[in-house]
Structure formats: structure tokens, C-alpha cells
Amino acid sequence: MKKTISIILSAALLCGCALAGCGNSEPAKAKDPIDGIEAKASTDKYRNYYQIFTQSYCDSNGDGVGDFQGIISQLDYLNDGNPAGGDDLGIDALWLTPINPSESYHKYSVEDYYNVDESFGTLEDFDKLVEEAHKRGINIILDLVLNHISYKNPLFLEACEEVRQGKLDGKAQYFEFHKPDYYTSDTQVVEVGDYVCEANFSQTMPEWNLNSEKTREEFKNIAKFWLDRGVDGFRLDAVKYFENKETDGVAFLKWFVDTCREIKPDVYLVGEDWSEDSEIEEFYGSGIDSLFAFRFAQSFGDIVDAINLKKGQSLVKKMATYDGKMSGANDGYINAVFLSNHDQVRIANALESKGLEAEKFAANVYMLMPGNSFTYYGEEIGMTAPNTDSDKYYRLPMVFDSDNLPGITVDGASTVEAPANGGVKQQLADDNSLLNHYRRLITVKLQNPEIARGRITAQQDFGDKEVGAYYIEKDGEKLLVIHNFSSDEAKTLEITADMLPNAAVRADFTGSVKTNHIELKDGKITLPAYSSVILKSAG
Ligand code: CA
Ligand code: CA
């Protein structure tokens, strides 16, 4: 019965997607291996995340600032709630960068932890966003800044007042106030009276004292405030800086994770620690669900490096090593993989000389890694940064329609750049667009839940440095994922029974997937340049 339903649904999907081709007499298409496989919505913590910089996403009232109502108006694009059909991207979780009141456009300096910035809307608008997202099966996590605060936050101002009067046993205890000689000369501080407060990021962002019982009580209240409103978890900012002279960063993180789980047992927490593996491994000891895998992301990270240098085999080795290390530190860990975020140059810039096919291929590489994928808004349409000197150019307005560019201003810049292949509207109509490639990747992940939930159990060596291949296993299910990192050479590979008995193509990702499918014939398979395939034993 279930099978019949899913076949009907996928027939409906094909019809819906082929809008551009409706009525045309197109040549017969090769059979798509993913047709007829049921795509099931996720109900656990394993999600395809989408990062939104609210200011830059969608402006509902024309004041030049993106807002909650704007996001609500685009929810059906992100996920219409039907995993088997529609013109939606299919993501099932959002990470919103900070939404709290703040004078800074990026809002990482929080002036009130219990409210939203009025330029984004009201708390009621935010509640509506959560409600509408949940209706469609989309979870929402908020960026939570626990390392520092805004120098304009009333609690900090009251603490400063007391410190100036020499009183250090009151509100001062919330923050890292010390005598000037407490810090070494290379520590950034802000001066208040005869004392200084640690401020690693900016004079406008003094730091919380994470060891203080007062601070922890406050943090518990903040977490409860948002989790009670229906938020599904938090992205924790600047985890690296939790550690200082007297604070054990891992112990503090463990306390916060445990506290959140007491409030909401299925809360999802992901931390930002832009560091080497050994430090990330230590922080996984806190029991946190996820920490971003920075080493694979960024313009100089492992994925872009492997694509530029055609080093598929060595990338897969790094992926397998990383998976082994982090699952050793926390066996329930969920890798958090991404290509870029609001602090990094757009991936389309990083792969500029390689073009659209490389962008699609980069998407294959991170989306098919176990764990949760985080897609930065606009990455699915190949948005670019026209200038890489300043962060604001990594945060330019989302382009829904390249014939009708948005009037959003980001930190004083009204720059909008249409992606080379158009906005959402244009790319939805193009079967071979980057956007439709992302839609396919997410569909395949919903058809094969073991991709996100499994572990990399082994590498497969095909004797070719440009081919990266690995097995993902979960609950008796086993997949073989193969990537061809060559930009110009097809690879013919032999698939033997000891790799996978009775292997069959489960899904394929080529540059032009609607007309060109990868087939396994007589034990051999040919992957075009920059293509990927998933094999599974035929059931
Ligand atoms: Ca607005
Ligand atoms: Ca849908």
C-alpha cells in the first residue's frame, strides 16, 4: 500500500517539476533511479539546515530591512510541508543569526536577551514564524551569544555603575571584571573605573563571567524563555572563548547542555568553534550534539582544496578520520557540515574559476556526508560576494527573482548582486540549475535516512587519487558513496560483489541529471567529471 502511494506521489512530483517542459515535445528521458522511492520527513534531530541572516532575507514592509514576516512569506519556498512534491527546496530546519535587540546590524552584541529587534518585527511576529515553520515540519534554532554581551545591555550598565563605586560583589559578578594586572597585555579589555573587563571581540562586547552562579541562573532563564516559545535549540556563538583563565570551557558547555536538556529533552545544540580537531574533540566531551566542522568548509578548507586539486581520495580519508575521532569523544555526535556561512566568502567565489558544475559537485560532497548539513542562504542559487574585504558582502540580500531585485540595505550598503544563473524564480524553471540540484540532494537524503544518521565505516580505494569513495552504515543498511573529483575526465570503475553484493544505483548526481543518468552495467560504472553516485544492494 505504502509503495503504491509513493509511486503516485513521485509521479505527481515529476509532473510538478517539469512545468517548464509541459506541452513541449522533449526526447524520452533516461529512467531516474530515485523515482518511486519514498521521501520521509524527518522527525528527529537529523535535519537539512538553512542559515538565514534575517536582515538580508526578505523585507515584507519595504523599509530596507529583512524581517520575520518576510521569512514567513518564503516558508513555502523553503518547505511546503510535503516531502514528495512542490516547488520547495525541502530544508527542514532554520538557523537564524541573532534576532535580539542590538545596535549592530549583525546583532551579535545583545542588548536584551528576552526580546527581538524591532526592525525584524515583534515577539508575536516571531511566534507566528515558529508556528508557521512547525506546521511545515521546519525546526528553528536561534543564535545564542553566551560569551559576550552588548556594552549597552542594562545589566552591564548597572554592573559598570557599581564597579565605578568599587562594589564588586553585586552585578559585577556577572562579568569578567578584574584589576588591570589580572590580564596579560595581549588580552583585549574594556576599562571601567579602576577595573577592566575582558572583551576579546570588541570594546562594545564585554564578556560574561561563565563561572558565576548569577550568570548561570540568567542563562537558564534565557534558554527557558526561548525554548518555552517553541524554539527547537540553539547555535552557540564563540564556544572557543568559553575557556579562559578561570573557566573550564568544556565544563561550562556541559552545564549548559545539561540545563537545556532538563528544560527540553530533545533540544538540538550546535556550537561554533573555529579550531583544530583536538579542541573540537575536547568540546564534544561536553555531550553537545554538534560542533561545526570548519576544517571542511571555507574557501581554504578541505572540500574546496580537494576540488581545486582533484584530491578525492585524501579528502575521504580526512572525513573518515574526523568521523572516527569525534564519535570516539561523543558516540551520539552529529557532524555539522557546511561550505560557507556569514563569516566567510561565498562558495561560488571560492570556486569561481571552476563554474556551476563545481558548485553542484561541492554541494554533493558536503550534503552526502553523515550528519546535519547547513546551507547558507543563497548558496543554493550560487550567490556571490562582489567584494571580499568586508563581512557585509557575505551577507547581501537574497535574490528570489533576478528580474526584480530586493531593496534591502546591509550595513549601509545597498549592493545587490544577481547570481549568474538567476534567482530562485529563474532557477526553479531550469531543470539543471544549482537550485534543482540542491532539491534533488535533499530529496535523496529523505529517501535514504542512513546518509545523515550513519557513520563512515570504511573507505573504498579504486586506485585513483581523483576518486573519493566511502561506505555509510546504519542499522544494517549500507551505502557506497562515490565522488569523481576530476573536472574533465569520466571514470569507469569496477564494482565487485565484495564491495556490495547485488549493487544497484540508488541515486546519481550529474551536471544534467534529467537527461543523463549513471548506470551500473556488467559490474562497471562510469562517473562523468564532477559527478557522484550512491550504490546500495538491491533489496
Ligand atoms: Ca522590513
Ligand atoms: Ca515539498
Image (cartoon, grey):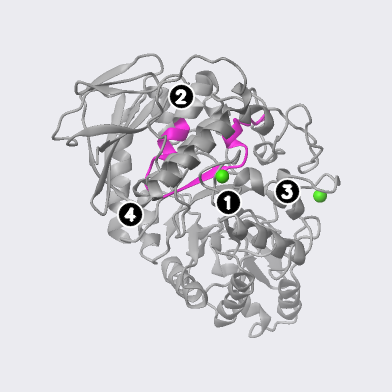
Measured from the top left, where is residue 264 in percent x and y?
Answer: 51, 73
Q: What is the span of residues highlighted in magenta in the rendered image?
A: 362-387
> According to the image, label 1 marks what residue?
81
Q: From where the camera sits, is residue 441 visible?
A: yes
| Disc assigned to residue 73 | 3
Instruction: Reply yes or no: does residue 381 show up in magenta.
Output: yes
Q: Residues within 10 Å of mark 4 (few under 14, many from 20)?
A: many
Q: Ligand 1 closer than 8 Å to the CB at disc 3? A: no
Residue nearer the viewer, 243 or 51: 51
- Give the SS element for disc 1: loop
Measured from the top left, where is residue 419 in percent x and y?
Answer: 66, 27
> According to the image, label 2 marks what residue?
513
Measured from the top left, where is residue 136 in percent x and y?
Answer: 60, 55
Q: For the residues carrying marks 4 and 3, which lies nearer the camera in this image?
A: 3
- Give the SS element for disc 4: helix
Q: Residues within 10 Å of mark 3 (few under 14, many from 20)?
A: some
Sequence-first disc among 1 and 4: 1
Q: From where the camera sits, is residue 295 visible?
A: no
- Give the SS element for disc 3: helix
> According to the image, label 4 marks what residue?
326
Give the vertical position of 129 relative to 3 (above or below): below
Q: Measure how far apart labels 3 and 1 are at the Cα level.
A: 14 Å
Q: Ligand 2 closer than 8 Å to the CB at disc 1? A: yes
Q: Measure how far apart labels 3 and 2 are at the Cα level.
A: 30 Å
Q: Measure how far apart labels 4 and 3 are at the Cα level.
A: 38 Å
Amino acid type of disc 2?
Val
Amino acid type of disc 4?
Met
Q: Residues within 10 Å of mark 2 (few under 14, many from 20)?
A: some
For the image, the number of numbered tags is 4
